[in-house]
Image: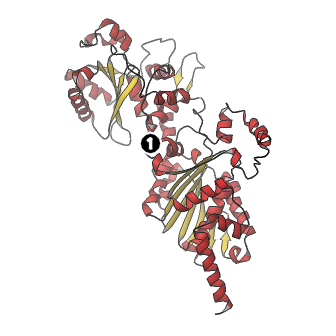
């Protein structure tokens, strides 16, 4: 056997060993010993298709991501790696700079086999079959991201918390359709209490699909357990254990609320925890709030609230006003009499006017609510009725004795809006801006707000819960 054949067999044996052991790869190729948390990350990436990592500073997330990228390039023959991020300068000075440094440290056998350019890495021989590329996560051009396909299609998203939801929902999650050879790996400081990255940890509809790795400031390779006071002094620079930055950067945890959120995330989480324990007052009526939507991505949503508890949500898509009105009427008639709403409050702006009109003609206890009009309560405090209703949702949740379902969509919609009161009146962030940041309309939060359009306390003071409402007097109870 020739010397070259022996070298080839030895290299093949090494690649086989590295394929199942990334820490061994890091040690033998780069002479790096990975920390226990970095080993956990590498194993999650090697064995899973959907990986989400949240962590504080000091963990070495850029470092370990670069290890995994080079591992994929060297141990796979047919592989395409895409590294996305919300900022091209950060990608260049972060992970791409790290990848170049790794390349410089390689033995000539490997270093000469790969070409590293400004935004691409490729194998010199048969370059098209083994590449890595840096890409900007741009929601205005998701079609380009959708076109990524390969036998081994590995996508990393750096600073995933800052990437718009549309990039994930309209493009990146599609790569998982490539089969077992696809991987989607999200890496970020958990600095937002909303968005797709947050959902991979907190949304019960998708969180179980993701392999999770959580790193903290104390997982740093420089941390010395025998001298914890040294790191604790550094950690205090982030504001101490009760501060938002400490929670994100040291503990590697999501903040309790987004900055300047109208509704505090602490109270939202408390309302979720309270759900099984709160009991609505029996003499307070059930109220329905209906936020109609037309064709498209937005949903028509009905919120069913009884006093201090949201009982349920109903959701429909692509219905015209008449079809939606029939859905609501059928639900009303199918509901036992004791559980029917005293009032169905409908957003009567635009196409909602047709829904309201149909329900009224059919004799249902419907109330048309034009949220663009002047406030019906405390007009000196709010700019519009919409501001009043959403602020009353805030006060309701902040009262603490409420229960809301563990719906990631509802939680995100409640935690997202901001407000300002510089004019002396409360003005909630406009719906267009909220929709832009969420990537969708806040239909669930709007439906909940509509249940506050008619005051149940004033209604209960004049009418017995067991008696029907005199609809002619509805405006007087707003």
Name the image quarter holding the N terminus.
Answer: bottom right
Residue placed most toward the observer, 190 or 137: 190
Q: Which residue is mark 1?
A: 204
Tell me: 134 left or right of 317: right
Name the image quarter holding the C terminus.
Answer: top left
- Which image quadrant for residue 354? top left
Work out whether residue 391 can be spotted: yes
Work out whether residue 346 can be spotted: no
Residue placed most toward the observer, 297 or 3: 3
Callout 1: SS: loop
- Which image quadrant for residue 95? bottom right
Q: Position of residue 52 (x, y in %)?
A: 55, 51
Tell me: 240 left or right of 295: right
Q: Position of residue 262 (x, y in %)?
A: 54, 26
Way the structure is coloured: secondary structure
| Position above or below: 195 against 364 | below
| Position above or below: 237 against 400 | below
- Which image quadrant for residue 303? top left
User: What residue sits 65% from the left and 64% below the top?
Assistant: 23
* Mark 1 nearby-residue class (10 Å; few <14, some 14–19, many ≥20): few
**What is the number of callouts on the image?**
1
| Position above or below: 422 against 62 | above
Q: Residue furthest front?
A: 226
Q: Position of residue 313 (x, y in %)?
A: 35, 32
Residue placed most toward the observer, 272 or 410: 272
């Amino acid at each position: 056997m020739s010397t070259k054949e022996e070298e080839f067999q030895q290299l093949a044996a090494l690649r086989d060993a590295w394929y199942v052991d990334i820490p061994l790869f890091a040690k033998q190729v780069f002479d790096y010993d990975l920390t226990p948390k970095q080993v956990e990350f590498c194993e999650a990436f090697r064995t899973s298709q959907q990986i989400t990592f949240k962590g504080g500073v000091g963990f070495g997330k850029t470092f370990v991501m670069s290890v995994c990228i080079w591992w994929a390039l060297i141990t796979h023959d047919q592989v395409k790696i895409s590294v996305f991020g919300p900022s091209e300068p950060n990608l260049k000075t972060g992970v791409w700079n790290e990848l170049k440094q790794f390349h410089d440290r390689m033995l000539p056998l490997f270093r000469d086999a790969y070409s590293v350019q400004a935004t691409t890495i490729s194998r010199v021989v048969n370059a098209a079959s083994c590449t890595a590329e840096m890409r900007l996560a741009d929601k205005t051009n998701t079609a380009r991201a959708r076109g990524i396909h390969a036998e081994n299609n590995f996508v990393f998203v750096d600073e995933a918390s800052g990437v718009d939801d549309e990039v994930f929902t309209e493009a990146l999650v599609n790569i998982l359709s490539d089969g077992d050879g696809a991987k989607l790996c999200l890496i970020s400081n958990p600095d937002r209490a909303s968005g797709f990255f947050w959902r991979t940890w907190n949304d019960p509809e998708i969180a179980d699909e993701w392999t999770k790795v959580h790193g903290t400031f104390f997982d740093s390779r420089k941390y010395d357990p025998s001298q914890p006071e040294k790191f604790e002094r550094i950690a205090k620079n982030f504001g101490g254990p009760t501060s938002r930055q400490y929670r994100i950067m040291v503990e590697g945890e999501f903040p309790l609320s987004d900055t300047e959120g109208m509704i505090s995330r602490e109270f939202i989480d408390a309302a979720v925890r309270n759900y099984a324990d709160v009991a609505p007052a029996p003499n307070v009526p059930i109220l329905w709030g209906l936020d109609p939507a037309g064709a498209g991505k937005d949903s028509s949503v009905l919120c069913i609230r009884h006093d201090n508890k949201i009982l349920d949500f109903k959701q429909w898509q692509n219905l015209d006003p008449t079809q939606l009105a029939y859905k609501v009427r059928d639900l009303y008639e199918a509901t036992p009499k004791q559980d029917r709403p005293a009032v169905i409050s409908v957003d009567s702006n635009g196409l909602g006017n047709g829904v309201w009109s149909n329900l009224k003609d059919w004799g249902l206890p419907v109330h048309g609510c034009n949220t663009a009009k002047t406030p019906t309560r405390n007009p000196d405090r709010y700019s519009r009725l919409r501001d009043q209703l959403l602020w009353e949702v805030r006060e309701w949740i902040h009262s603490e004795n409420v229960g809301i379902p563990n719906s990631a969509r509802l939680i995100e919609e409640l935690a997202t809006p901001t407000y300002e009161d510089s004019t002396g009146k409360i003005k909630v962030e406009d719906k267009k801006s909220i929709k832009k940041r969420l990537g969708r309309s806040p239909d669930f939060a709007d439906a909940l707000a509509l249940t506050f359009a008619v005051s149940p306390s004033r209604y209960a003071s004049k009418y017995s819960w067991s008696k029907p409402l005199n609809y002619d007097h509805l405006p007087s109870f707003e």
